[in-house]
Amino acid sequence: MKPDKSRRGFIRDALKGLSVAALVPQLYSIVPAHSPASRSLLSTKLVQPKIGFAIHGGAGTILKSEMSAEREREYRAKLTEALMTGYNILKKGGAGLDAVEATIRMMEDSPLFNAGKGAVFTNAGTNELDASIMDGSTLKAGAVASLKHIKNPISLARLVMEKSRHVMMVGEGAETFAKQQGIELVPQSYFYTESRWKALQREKALEEKNNKAPKEKKPERQHATFIDHAYGTVGAVALDQAGNIAAGTSTGGMTNKKWGRVGDSPIIGAGTYANNLTCGVSATGDGEYFIRLAVAHDLSNMLEYKGLSLKEAADAVIEKVGKLGGGGGLIAIDKAGNIAMSFNTAGMYRGRIGANEQPIIEIYKD
């Protein structure tokens, strides 16, 4: 019996314009996922989904000579756990946004990183947190800044994207929105860690010393230069089985920050960007420079307009940051699943994994 022409036309129209990776979920709606036919389908390279996932936990002067073996084991263990959390979501067919959010939440809950629980202190002795997330399939984004009582800022950023008409909310207004959405709030004491508190005292002492130095004498550090610190900002980028790209970033900002300072992490196009046509990016570093150069969006533009490879574009934007006087790094993933990690500091906590690959965790430059 000849196939029904109308049915063939319906299927053709339904699948028209979809990427190879995006065809898989559509085909599963016709062919059961665990049937012999589906196994045969996935064995065909033309429709095998390409997934990829990468994370970072901040960049800075991270030297092996100054890292104890126990501390390094702690970082590697947590980075591996976070990386595999997101990857396993993708491997099961989950959305890139879910992988990014789940992984960043895990890193926000760890005192090892400057995000959530491990956030640094402001000059006033408080903790103020920022985060953002972006969906490359729609270019929708959500961002939050200057939060003081939100346990997981990345989840609130996603709610801003999905449950409001806005892109960015800050301070008390953002926390009022959080209460309406049932987000968990915590007291400021939740974010306290002894190491971050001591770092604030050292920073204040150095600032006072520099302020008392004679004007003709060059101070030890005119401002809190990034190169002297490992900021610990966290981020993740994902490519899921449907071919969608997602990116997210979360941070506690810079130690001893004043006057409601906000860095690049919650700024879409500076610290975070995702576009299915190009790539997903999450940055970490001296935020003022990343904002001025719109680093994440600049990287995407290089792929779209200049046709550079992901690594070429990543290295180029970080070179721009360095020439302007800033330090830091970024992770990025493109629509083909290529991953790039570029930084101009002594180290960057980072991890990556592709489809059916082993996880790779790195800390130092070499």
Image: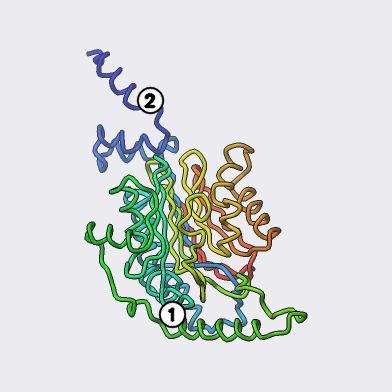
User: Residue at the spot x=40%, y=53% of the render?
Assistant: 133
Q: Which residue is mark 2?
A: 16
User: Residue at the spot x=49%, y=42% of the render?
Assistant: 335
Disc 1 from disc 2: Cα separation: 56 Å
- How packed is label 1: few (under 14 Cα within 10 Å), some, or many (20 or more)? some
**Between 210 and 301, which is closer to the camera in this rendering?**
210
Q: Which of the 4 image quarters holds residue 170?
A: bottom left
**Between 243 and 297, which is closer to the camera in this rendering?**
297
Q: Is residue 59 left or right of residue 23?
A: right
Which circle marks residue 365 in the picture?
none
Amino acid type indicated by mark 2: Lys
Query: Is residue 87 visible in this depiction of the protein?
Result: no
User: Residue at the spot x=30%, y=38% of the render?
Assistant: 38
**Between 73 and 249, which is closer to the camera in this rendering?**
249
Question: Label 2 near label 1: C-beta < 8 Å?
Answer: no
Question: Dot 2 lies on which element?
Answer: loop
Query: Is residue 347 visible in this depiction of the protein?
Result: yes
Q: Which residue is mark 1?
A: 125
User: Residue at the spot x=24%, y=61% of the render?
Assistant: 179
Quarter of the picture containing the N terminus is top left
Residue 243 on image: x %, y %: 41, 41
Residue 221 sits above or below residue 42 on the image: below
Amino acid type indicated by mark 1: Gly
Q: Earlier in the sequence, mark 1 or mark 2?
A: 2
Residue 296 on image: x %, y %: 54, 51
Residue 176 on image: x %, y %: 27, 60
Quarter of the picture containing the C terminus is bottom right
Question: Dot 1 lies on which element?
Answer: loop
- How packed is label 2: few (under 14 Cα within 10 Å), some, or many (20 or more)? few
Residue 53 on image: x %, y %: 45, 54
Q: Nearer the viewer, mark 1 or mark 2?
A: 1
